Amino acid sequence: MAGNKQVESEHYRFASYMNKGRWVSLWHQLEEVQKLSPKNALEIGVGPGFFQTLAKTIDLAVETLDIDPALKPDHVGSATALPFADDTYDLTCAFQMLEHLPYDQSLLAFAEMARVSQRYAVISLPDAKPVWQYSVHIPRVGPKRFLLPRPHLKAPAHEFDGEHYWEIGKRDYPLSRVIADLSQYMRLVTTYRVHENPFHRLFVFEH
């Protein structure tokens, strides 16, 4: 994306990268995109490449873009200056990617996603606000899952760890601010945290 790559391609080796939580997040990513029935889609940030590979099995046409040619994207380029005309894709998506840019640059990248998307954008971002996970089974209704916020006095400051420049729930980055800033470019349809992996929060936007 903008700037230099942060990790080598070996970072995405299956055994060390794809835990169960990431698999569940991947399922939600595919479900949200599939429900929108895009004619074509662009994924920004290839990662291990599983999203595009699995999308093909359910007949989703997904192209990829990344700054690192070693990840073998369909297009090599910067997220903050996408090499496409306006409305090139029906849908753009970026999963756990925007936080790898400084906040102002991440907004520029999302503005670019909105520019080249004719209809939708689907993203996920890290949400560091602590929660408790609960599951209950209600007779005749079935299982119900919910997240309860853990009490805390003050949001901690975020320190750059070599990958993430910011995270939702950290000081200066409340969810309300992130939604307001992203909503300058597209209208928010829905957002939720993945129950099995609450560090990942999904967003669906539309024009």
Image: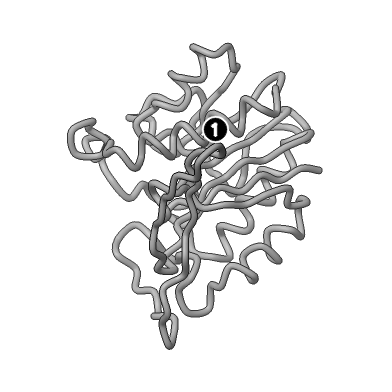
Q: Image point 45% across, 66% down: which residue?
A: 166
Asked if residue 117 lies left or right of residue 75, the reply is: right
Image vertical order of residue 13 relative to residue 170, above or below:
above
In the structure shown, which secondary structural element does the residue marked by tag 1 occupy? strand
Seen in the picture, residue 102 relative to 199 is either above or below; the reply is below
Q: Residue furthest front?
A: 139
The reply, left or right, for residue 55 in relation to residue 198 is right
The amino acid type, in three-letter code, at marker 1 is Glu
- Which residue occupies the extreme right position in the image? 207
| Residue at left offset 44%, top offset 86% | 154
* Scheme of colours in the image: one colour
User: Measured along the vertical axis of the image, is residue 143 above or below residue 201?
Assistant: above
Q: If the image is split into quadrants, where does the C terminus sit?
A: top right
Give the residue number, with chain letter if any, for mark 1: 43
Q: Position of residue 106 (x, y in %)?
A: 56, 57
The count of marks equals 1
Residue 200 in the image, given as x and y percentages of width and height: 45, 51
Which residue is pictured at 67% across the width and 40% down the height? Answer: 121
Which one is nearer the viewer's eye here, 23 or 115? 23
Residue 137 percent coordinates (x, y): 45, 44
Circle 1 crowding by C-alpha within 10 Å: few under 14, some 14–19, many from 20: many
**Looking at the rendering, which quadrant does residue 179 occupy?**
bottom right
Q: Nearer the viewer, residue 63 or 125?
A: 125
Nearer to us in this view, 13 or 191? 191
Q: Position of residue 91 (x, y in %)?
A: 68, 32
| Residue lying farthest to the left in this orientation | 15
Q: Residue at x 36, y 47 (%)?
A: 5
Looking at this view, is 176 or 152 the one in front?
152
Q: Horizontally, is 175 left or right of 207 in the view?
A: left
